[in-house]
Image (spheres, grey):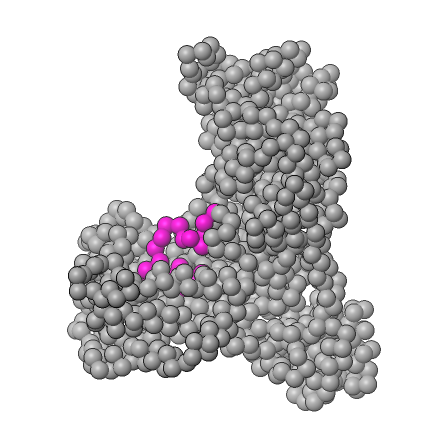
């Protein structure tokens, strides 16, 4: 990470944010602000021009921001959101899922050379794929070789395990799950107004915490996200029990890539998720 | 706050229900039924004070808190509106059905404070149910109380609960006046048409020597309270009963709090003056 | 009295002959209190475990009774109150048990499930020799090296633990350890939390007047509505009751629930007195720092710092308390 470049980018972000708030382009801006711990930032909602200087841009700007737009579906003015590559794909995801209107958002593009977050290692979109204004110059993307080698590296290792070993692995993981639903709530693909797990009914998702119920939750979540996963890794980051949740959707994405060709979700705003569109050339030997 | 009745005929564990049976079911409105509940040997499960609550369950479906609408020598009754999965299951019961019951829970109407006063009962929809236990108490101890007015409103004539009480039983009680209104009438309805708060203002009750017992949907409570204030009633003299989602019923599980008070334990009966002291969150 | 560290395993072995002994350990990568099997390592290297010890007394899922439906309903209470010892619990977590005692054992009703487990639990606290950056127990009126609510208090002096019994249950432990205990031992000085928070009784009173304050809108915005803060909290005790139904029979259980969940206070007709994150975050902070004080005369936060450490949105109760301390009252 080129420090001077990023310090400059932070100054440019603040300047742009101040201008956008001053001229009324946006009602408020969602970015990152400091906490009392140097290595943690928290989502910041800046509504006044003087609050623009509280925005920070550093290697600890980790939290995904796009989903906060769901808290304000009918804003009076546009919502400004700082978007890195992953956040911009989240925006595409939410727009594509008809959760938000693109014209209600003003996207402040933040080219990102990676954060203190292991998921950034093989990032394939360091620069936002959609934005209204770009802060500073784009950063150099990972080579396709590096990104694709990194993308499914863990899955390839995982696939070497026998089904029994894999079952054992996940059983142990779900013994740890406390069902806080942080993975669901942080996920830009989890936008159901009422999650099946919260249904006011006995029998859909048992509330008792045990291996079986937690596995049902894990499976349902993974399949529901499935091809709509934008690979931001937030589910795994927020898991307080350290479950490697990304492996589930990554496995599905790997299979999807094997079956339907190169696919990344949220990169194009118009494209429906791959399992949501039908093409005559799709493989159908299972039918 | 009023004293709490600790009586519980269940196991010594307050969270374990006592198996009772439904011995009679009465259809009050298209979506309200009254259940007569007795112990398996035909006794009264417990003797609640007016306004107290009971946790009623079908263990395989769920459990919820209901007000006890009446009691007799050997039974208690609860009128329940079909509003969800559990109450739907209640509405499919036939007499003889066994159910789980625990209670009584919560405080009760301050009957001693009401003695010697004229009383105005205001109920909306199913909100007459919790008040009915007190109305019956007053009639059973008629000499203790002054004039009784009962103002009751429902959406339509079909939605009026306790029709027998309204048309036959209560009008016969001495020194008692009934005022029934509906939001929308029908071709046979000859009574008043209009919302409860408007009818209340029209009837222009004097606050002197009178206490009010108010229960109904939150929106009705809000506007009826405003009307009562306009008419000069003091907040100390208006008593209401609240509804919140409850699970344990004994002040442990956390969800029915308003500020530091638990509706299941410190409530459900509060005066408007007491509610003023609490955060506006119900 | 003092106990050589080299005798710790033996000391625990003595206790485990009579009771299940929970010790801080790492299970599948998660630091928590787990049943000691006589050999597994005891991890006192961390200040606090990631998961609090509350599930020993208040399991995340606790069976209450079994039932059989049919013409006659059968209900059978499930009682499971084994003799247990928790070893290595820090003073903040001991204070948390004190909070749960108040909830489950006081105010009209005694919760039988909790009472049974509590009765059979012996609490052996080990004081902290260092503090984490999110620790703020001394701002909450606690000491990192002393747990008045413990049965036995132990403090690390390097090669030994200084051991003191605080209760009759504690004396029984000391009696059982007699062959291992040596005279003497000086209690080390308590470490100090580096994080100082401006908590005071005035904050509780001030908060009680801040229900309508604009601060809630602002502090709640990053919240994602998950249960992380409440489930890693050693004092959060709210629960749900539900059934595990199989055809015509099943089990009624209670389980941890979270006031952060949107369906927590939603009623059957759909009305929700706490419909949004503002109301829910307000309820949690108020409960911790004001409502509980009003009802039980102590705060429901022990300063363990787990919520500040684990919150996905990096919300921080310590920053919140300091914000309230600085808030001018005319805004309240």
- Please give the name of the residue rendered at 61% of the width and 51% of the height, measured from the top-left corner: C249
Magenta segment includes A166: no
- Please give the name of the residue rendered at 27% of the width and 69% of the height, measured from the top-left corner: A256
Is A85 in front, or is C267?
A: C267
Quadrant for the N terminus of chain C, please.
bottom right
Across and down, in percent, residue A45 comes to: 33, 58
Across and down, in percent, residue A36 comes to: 43, 69
Judge whether C191 appears above or below A208 on screen: below
Magenta segment includes A187: yes
Drawn side of residue C55 relative to residue A194, left or right: right
Q: Which residues are magenta?
A: A181-200
Q: Is residue A51 visible?
A: no
Q: Is residue A184 visible?
A: yes
Across and down, in percent, residue B251 comes to: 64, 47
Is C71 in front, or is C193?
A: C71
* Residue A4 sits in quarter: bottom left
* Residue A285 sits in quarter: bottom left
Q: Main secondary structure of the magenta part?
A: loop
Drawn side of residue B237 relative to residue B189, left or right: right
- Please give the name of the residue rendered at 81% of the width and 73% of the height, measured from the top-left corner: C172
Drawn side of residue A126 relative to residue B64, left or right: left
* Residue B167 sits in quarter: top right
Judge whether B274 appears above or below C157 on screen: above
Across and down, in percent, residue C82 comes to: 72, 66
Drawn side of residue B28 relative to residue A17, left or right: right
């Amino acid at each position: 990470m080129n420090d001077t470049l990023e310090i400059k980018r932070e100054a440019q972000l603040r300047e742009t944010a101040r201008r956008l708030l001053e001229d009324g382009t946006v009602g408020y801006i969602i970015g990152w602000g400091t906490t009392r711990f140097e290595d943690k930032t928290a989502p910041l909602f800046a509504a006044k021009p003087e609050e623009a200087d509280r925005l920070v841009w550093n290697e600890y700007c980790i939290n995904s921001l796009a989903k906060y737009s769901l808290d304000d579906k009918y804003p009076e003015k546009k919502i400004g959101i700082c978007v890195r590559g992953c956040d911009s794909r989240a925006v595409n995801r939410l727009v594509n899922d008809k959760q938000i209107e693109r014209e209600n958002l003003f996207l402040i593009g933040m080219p990102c050379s990676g954060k203190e977050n292991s998921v950034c290692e093989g990032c394939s979109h360091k620069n936002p794929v959609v934005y209204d204004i770009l802060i500073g110059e784009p950063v150099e993307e990972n080579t396709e070789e590096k990104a694709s080698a990194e993308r499914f590296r863990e899955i390839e290792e995982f696939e070497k395990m026998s089904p029994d070993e894999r079952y054992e692995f996940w059983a142990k993981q779900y013994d740890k799950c406390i069902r806080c639903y942080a993975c669901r709530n942080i996920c830009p693909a989890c936008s159901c107004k009422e999650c099946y797990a919260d249904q006011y009914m006995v029998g859909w998702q048992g509330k008792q915490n045990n291996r079986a119920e937690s596995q049902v939750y894990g499976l349902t979540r993974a399949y529901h996200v499935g091809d709509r996963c934008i690979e931001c890794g937030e589910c795994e980051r927020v898991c307080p029990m350290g479950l490697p949740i990304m492996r589930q959707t990554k496995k599905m994405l790997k299979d999807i890539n094997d079956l339907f060709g190169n696919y990344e979700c949220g990169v194009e705003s118009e494209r429906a998720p791959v399992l949501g569109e039908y093409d005559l050339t799709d493989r159908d030997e299972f039918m | 706050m009023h004293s709490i009745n600790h009586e519980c005929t269940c196991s010594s564990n307050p969270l374990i229900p006592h198996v009772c049976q439904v011995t009679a079911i009465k259809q009050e409105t298209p979506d309200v039924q009254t259940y007569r509940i007795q112990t398996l040997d035909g006794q009264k499960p417990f003797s609640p004070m007016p306004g107290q609550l009971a946790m009623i369950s079908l263990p395989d479906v769920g459990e919820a808190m209901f007000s006890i609408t009446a009691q007799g020598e050997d039974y208690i009754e609860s009128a329940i509106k079909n509003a969800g999965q559990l109450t739907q299951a209640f509405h499919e019961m036939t007499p003889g059905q066994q159910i789980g019951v625990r209670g009584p829970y919560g405080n009760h109407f301050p009957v001693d404070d009401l003695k010697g006063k004229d009383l105005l009962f205001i109920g909306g929809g199913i909100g007459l149910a919790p008040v009915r236990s007190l109305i019956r108490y007053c009639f059973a101890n008629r000499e203790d109380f002054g004039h009784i007015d009962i103002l009751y409103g429902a959406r339509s004539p079909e939605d009026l609960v306790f029709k027998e009480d309204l048309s036959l039983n209560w009008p016969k009680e001495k020194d008692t006046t009934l005022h029934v209104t509906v939001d929308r009438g029908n071709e046979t309805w000859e009574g008043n048409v209009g919302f409860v708060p408007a009818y209340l203002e029209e009837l222009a009750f004097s606050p002197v020597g009178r206490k009010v017992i108010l229960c109904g949907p939150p929106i009705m409570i809000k506007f009826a309270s405003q009307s009562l204030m306009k008419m000069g009633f003091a907040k100390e003299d208006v008593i209401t009963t609240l509804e919140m989602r409850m699970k344990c019923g004994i002040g442990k599980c956390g969800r029915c709090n308003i500020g530091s008070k638990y509706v299941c334990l410190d409530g459900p009966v509060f005066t408007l003056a007491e509610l003023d002291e609490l955060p506006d969150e119900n | 009295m003092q106990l050589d560290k080299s005798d710790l395993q033996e000391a625990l072995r003595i206790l485990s002959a009579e009771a299940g002994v929970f010790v801080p350990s790492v299970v599948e990568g998660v630091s928590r209190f787990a049943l000691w099997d006589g050999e597994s390592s005891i991890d006192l290297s961390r200040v606090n475990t990631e998961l609090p010890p509350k599930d020993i007394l208040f399991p995340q899922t606790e069976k209450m009774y079994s039932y059989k439906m049919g013409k006659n309903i059968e209900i059978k209470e499930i009682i499971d109150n084994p003799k247990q010892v928790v070893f290595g619990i820090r003073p903040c977590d001991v204070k948390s048990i004190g909070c749960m005692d108040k909830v489950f054992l006081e105010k009209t009703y005694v919760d039988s499930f909790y009472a049974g487990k509590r009765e059979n639990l012996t609490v052996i606290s080990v004081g902290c020799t260092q503090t984490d950056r999110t620790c703020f127990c001394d701002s909450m009126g606690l000491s990192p090296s002393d747990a008045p609510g413990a049965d036995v208090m132990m403090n690390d002096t390097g090669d030994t633990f200084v051991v003191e019994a605080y209760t009759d249950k504690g004396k029984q432990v000391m009696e059982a350890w007699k062959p291992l205990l040596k005279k003497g031992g000086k209690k080390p000085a308590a470490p100090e939390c580096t994080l100082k928070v401006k908590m005071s009784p005035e904050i509780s009173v001030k908060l009680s007047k801040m229900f309508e304050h604009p601060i809630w809108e602002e502090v709640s915005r990053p919240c994602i509505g998950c249960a992380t803060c409440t489930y890693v909290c050693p004092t959060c005790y709210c629960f749900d009751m539900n059934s595990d139904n199989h055809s015509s029979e099943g089990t009624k259980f209670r389980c941890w629930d979270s006031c952060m969940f949107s369906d927590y206070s939603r009623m059957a007709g759909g009305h929700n007195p706490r419909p949004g994150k503002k109301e829910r975050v307000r309820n949690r902070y108020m409960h911790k720092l004001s409502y509980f004080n009003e009802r039980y005369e102590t705060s429901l936060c022990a300063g363990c710092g787990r919520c500040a450490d684990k919150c996905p949105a990096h919300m921080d109760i310590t920053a919140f308390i300091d914000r309230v301390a600085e808030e001018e009252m005319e805004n309240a």
